[in-house]
Image (spheres, rainbow, N blue to C red):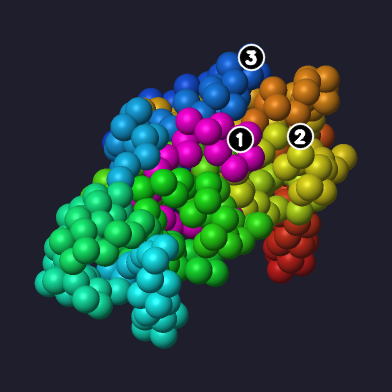
């Protein structure tokens, strides 16, 4: 009787989960060992990656994404030009005066305009190439000088950062990587790393923010490119539902996309005497099936925290004890019996 009732309750929970699609008809009942195996996949990132694959098909990163590149000068860029002239310091001072008062030399129609020189074509050149071209122009005008060029301000050479970040625009130069961009963007310490992502050319990249920022995995520290879009999610974007016989029925936000099962039960007020500690269920909406794991509290406290994990979208359900189920049934029936007794008494009085 108890097992039938538990199965009925689980079926109601499955049907009530809005994230479960109707075409998913495969339901697998699994044990604690299988939950441990899937928890290892979560720690390795494979299980969480599979979640992303079902929704957005992220593009895998490769070695090219990790390589720095030479940023090219484009129109409306502003260059800081330094010309060191050992025999004519006044000329060097004149160029430096423009840097200080005008902010630098703006690229207009592909050219920059330096005093006493012809217009210098710099569009689509690297900074080193621009230095060489400016030096050649100086020599044409009998100016023996050493030239240095840097970007004072970039035009459209930036990454946009949306969500839980303070600075929405971060300029990139072919050397600035994701870790530095996130630091300059001042993302919130409470940001939801599991729900954060990067778009490049409107394609989602396979970047794991948790592995980069928490575990220090530099294989995800890609070089950022102009036009990249970063979204820093909120922990409320992904959550686990805890219901059944727990102290507090709640929805728990997940910053990293997963949490130890033991922690989430303790944080929900534990399991009261009315709960069956031998029947803790984790209902998981997998990409191809619905998985239902059954775990006991005794096994849970014996295992390390990272051995039994729940992830975003899971439902944790603690069933009632058999005695509690019978108590509820008897309480409901007692009202019925009382009503029947009153009805019989009225019938006898009438007759």
Can you give x and y, in whole percent of width and height, for residue 280 in the image?
A: 69, 31
On the question of residue 205 being in view, the answer is yes
Residue 174 on image: x %, y %: 36, 48
For this view, does 137 lie left or right of residue 30? left
Q: Residue at x 77, y 49 (%)?
A: 268
Residue at the (79%, 47%) spot, across then down: 267
- Whether tag 3 and tag 1 are in contact, CB under 8 A, the answer is no
Residue 155: give its label.
Answer: none
The quadrant of the image that shows the N terminus is: top right
- Asked if residue 322 is positioned above or below residue 249 in the image, the reply reads above
Of mark 2 and mark 3, the one earlier in the sequence is: 3
- The residue that mark 3 highlights is 33
**Among the 4 quarters of the image, the one containing residue 169:** bottom left
Q: Which residue is mark 1?
A: 216
The residue sitting at 55% across, 38% down in the picture is 212
Q: How many neighbours does mark 1 have within 10 angstroms: few (below 14), some (14-19), or many (20 or more)?
A: few
**Splitting the image into 4 quarters, where does residue 106 fall?**
bottom left
Q: Give the number of the mark in front: 3 or 1.
A: 1
Side (left or right) of 310 relative to 177: right
Task: Give the spatial CA distance, label 2 vs label 1.
Answer: 26 Å
Mark pair 2, 3: CA separation: 15 Å
Image height of 60 relative to 176, above or below: above
Magenta segment: 211-237
Q: Secondary structure at mark 2?
A: helix
Q: Is residue 164 above or below residue 309?
A: below
Residue 172 left/right relative to 314: left
Q: Where does label 2 land, which residue?
A: 262
User: Mark 3 or 1 closer to N-term?
Assistant: 3
């Amino acid at each position: 009787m108890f097992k039938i009732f538990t199965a009925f309750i689980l079926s109601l929970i499955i049907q009530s989960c809005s994230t479960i699609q109707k075409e998913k008809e495969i339901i697998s009942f699994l044990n604690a060992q299988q939950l441990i195996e899937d928890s290892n996949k979560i720690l390795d990132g494979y299980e969480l990656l599979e979640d992303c694959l079902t929704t957005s098909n992220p593009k895998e990163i490769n070695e090219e994404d990790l390589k720095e590149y030479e940023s090219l000068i484009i129109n409306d860029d502003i260059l800081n030009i330094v010309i060191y002239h050992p025999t004519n310091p006044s000329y060097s001072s004149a160029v430096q005066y423009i840097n200080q008062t005008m902010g630098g030399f703006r690229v207009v129609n592909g050219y920059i305009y330096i005093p006493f020189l012809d217009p210098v074509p710099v569009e689509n050149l690297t900074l080193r190439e621009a230095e060489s071209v400016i030096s050649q122009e100086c020599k044409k005008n009998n100016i023996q000088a050493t030239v240095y060029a840097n970007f004072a301000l970039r035009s459209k050479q930036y990454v946009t950062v949306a969500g839980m970040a303070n600075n929405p625009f971060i300029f990139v130069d072919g050397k600035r990587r994701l870790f530095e961009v996130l630091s300059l963007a001042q993302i919130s310490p409470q940001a939801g790393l599991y729900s954060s992502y990067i778009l490049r050319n409107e394609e989602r990249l396979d970047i794991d923010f948790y592995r980069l920022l928490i575990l220090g995995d530099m294989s995800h520290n890609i070089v950022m490119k102009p036009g990249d879009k970063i979204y820093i999610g909120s922990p409320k974007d992904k959550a686990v539902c805890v219901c059944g016989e727990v102290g507090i029925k709640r929805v728990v936000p997940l910053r990293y996309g997963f949490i130890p099962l033991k922690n989430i039960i303790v944080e929900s007020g534990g399991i009261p005497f009315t709960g069956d500690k031998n029947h803790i269920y984790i209902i998981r909406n997998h990409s191809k099936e619905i998985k239902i794991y059954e775990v006991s509290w005794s096994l849970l406290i014996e295992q390390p925290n990272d051995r039994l994990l729940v992830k975003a979208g899971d439902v944790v359900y603690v069933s009632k004890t058999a005695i509690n189920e019978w108590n509820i049934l008897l309480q409901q029936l007692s009202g019925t019996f009382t009503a029947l007794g009153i009805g019989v008494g009225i019938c006898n009085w009438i007759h």
